Image (cartoon, rainbow, N blue to C red):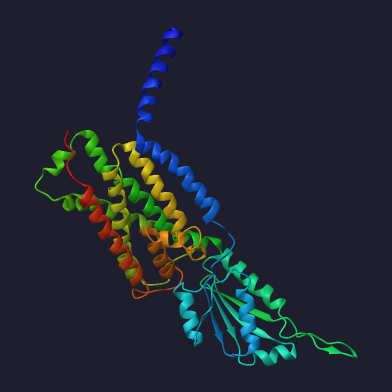
Amino acid sequence: MRWPRFWSNVLAVAYRETQIIRHDKPFLGVLVAQPVMMLVLFGLVLSNEPRNVPWAVLDRSDTTVSRRLVRDVQATGYFLAPRAVASYAEGRRLLREGRALAFLVLPERFAADVERGRPRVQLLLDGSDPLSAARVGGYVGEVAAAFEARPAPVHRAGPARLPGAIDVRQRFRFNPTLRDRNFFLATLAGMLLTNICLSATSLGLVGERENGTYEQMLSLPTTAIEIVLGKMLPYVGVSYALMLAALAAAGMLFGIWPQGSFLALLLVTLPFVLASLAIGVFVSVLAHTSAQAVFITVFFIMPSFVLSGSMFPYQLMPHGVRELGGLFPLRWYQIALRRIVERGAGLVEVAGPIVALVTLFLLLLVGIRWRMKPRLG
């Protein structure tokens, strides 16, 4: 082998590929956007420190002392404005629906108990996210330990005894032992389906275009929507099989079985799978090459995992980012999964996520139909 000629050929091919990459603007755009996206997500969005915590308060005492305790908790900066509830059942319902992560109950004789030095309150916490629940409980406990109902009076006989620290009786709902695996395995099926659905369909139409059969396919006596739905249907069956396998594995290996309606789980899975497959198809009609489709797909998968709430609670994310995560189907599916698997929800409790997923699917079909057209010449 002649080494000068060998390296000359290698460099010539490398130069040719470099020129192709240099003129591939979509590829370069995604190449720059991915590290920027990850830098923003991991630098600004993700944090193990709870913030913007939604919580509810049942103030049966309704005194200056009880209201002051509520203000002190909110003044920590970790909590949103408290949602006042009229009954214990209403507060538990908010926890079950995920609209509150903490529920503080102040008894009727709270002010009198503070004066006697034996104050006690109850704090119910959503234990489906163990780390956040433990931290939120710790913040409330710190406020309660440092709480002073009134300034200490001055006595000539000596210093007065201050009211004792408030005893916060914490109870963790849905995951009493605060096992981390419950938080992650509850949405394992959603993450697996997101990955397989986007990867499976993102190369479909762009592959037809690269093979030169795209215009031929569109010339068939079928509409664009019929073609798209026909390409999706086989993967719907695959997705259901994968979902059932993930649930069975989590149940048999770790004892985590759905506590709610299995019918509701099957129903909410269909629009989620269709919406996720539609994202892959939309990527396929946008991309010009298979390489572009792969890069764009990764651009969708990572934010889906992070912003949906599957890995980190979306309730604790900053405003703007939290609403942006609602554009990903996994956000609504993971809400439904946690309600069914951990909270024992039925079809009524997951009706909201079903409507959101159906809406996303229909909007994606409109976008696909708009972009899907013959490209001759």
Q: Residue at x 42, y 70 (%)?
A: 339
Considering only vertical position in the picture, is 88 above or below 240?
Answer: below
Going by the image, does 151 lie left or right of 223?
right
Q: Residue at x 55, y 85 (%)?
A: 58
Q: Position of residue 352 (x, y in %)?
A: 35, 71
Q: Count of labels shown? A: 0
Going by the image, does 69 lie left or right of 274?
right
Q: Position of residue 26 (x, y in %)?
A: 35, 38
Q: Please identify the quarter of the rendering in which residue 23 is found.
A: top left
User: Residue placed farthest to the right in the image?
Assistant: 157
User: Residue placed farthest to the top in the image?
Assistant: 2
Q: Residue at x 40, y 72 (%)?
A: 260
Considering only vertical position in the picture, is 216 above or below 108?
Answer: above
Which quadrant holds the N terminus?
A: top left
Q: Please identify the quarter of the rendering in which residue 172 is found.
A: bottom right
Q: Position of residue 276 (x, y in %)?
A: 32, 54
Which quadrant holds the C terminus?
A: top left
Going by the image, does 312 lie left or right of 147?
left
Q: Position of residue 165 (x, y in %)?
A: 73, 81
* Front-most of residues 12 and 255: 12
Residue 248 appears anywhere in the view: no
Residue 280 appears anywhere in the view: yes
